[in-house]
Image: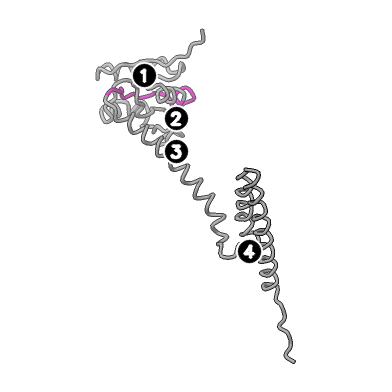
Amino acid sequence: MWPLPRQTSRSRSRRVTSWFLRSMRYRSSRYSRRCITIGRPSTLTNTSSKLATSRPLLYRFEGFQRGVLVLDPILLTLALMITRGSFRAMGLIASTRSKRNRRVLVYGAGAFGRLLVREMRANQHWHMNPVGFLDDDPAKAHRWIAGVPVRGTLDDLERVLRRYSVDEVVLSSPAINGSVEARVRAVCGDRERKVRRFSMEIE
């Protein structure tokens, strides 16, 4: 007498799976008959959706690459970030290339200067395009602050006005006064550029 083949755990799990699927089919057929008599088509839909969801769990994700479960949310997050960033970049490019906007140089890249740049971009009806900062702090040299580059210091004012076709200069802080303000107004006066001061008021 030949010995009976031993059942492996894989064949046993397949037998259990096939038995479970046959029982689910039998139950779904009973539920479908009940739907037809009662008139509720949602019962069959719920049963089939549960069956489709349980199949990967019963087969222990056979045929599925587990790396997909990790890469899918990562790629989705990257796609959302790229989409939002592209729309923002397109808006900035459109605002910078608009001929209606005045090219503004902001003197002072501190807290008031960052606030001023944000307000310029948030209020399109101002028609002001910040092309750069000027700041005498060496730690801020060649940096980008609030999406705007620091073009230089007070000594570079005349060069920046000429190179970037600046229409006006805005003093961002009330601390900018005295000899510094006088020099800014003198350089801008020689090139016929307007100088204004940013101020906040609460009424």
Q: Quadrant of the N terminus?
A: bottom right
Which one is nearer the viewer's eye here, 60 or 34? 34
The residue segment tinted magenta is 100-114
Real-space Cα distance between discs 1 and 2?
28 Å
The residue identified by callout 4 is: 59
Label 3 sits on residue: 84
Q: Nearer the viewer, mark 1 or mark 4?
A: 4
Q: Nearer the viewer, mark 4 or mark 2?
A: 4
Q: Element at badge 2? A: loop
User: What's the amino acid at mark 4?
Assistant: Tyr
How far from the left and from the top, in percent, is residue 121? Answer: 40, 25
Horizontal and vertical percent position of residue 70: 56, 54
Mark 2 Cα-neighbour bin, 10 Å: few <14, some 14–19, many ≥20: few
The amino acid marked with disc number 2 is Asp
Magenta-colored stretch includes residue 107: yes
Determine which residue is flagged by label 1: 126
Instruction: Decide: is 146 above or below 73.
Output: above
Residue 130 at what x, y percent from top left? 36, 26
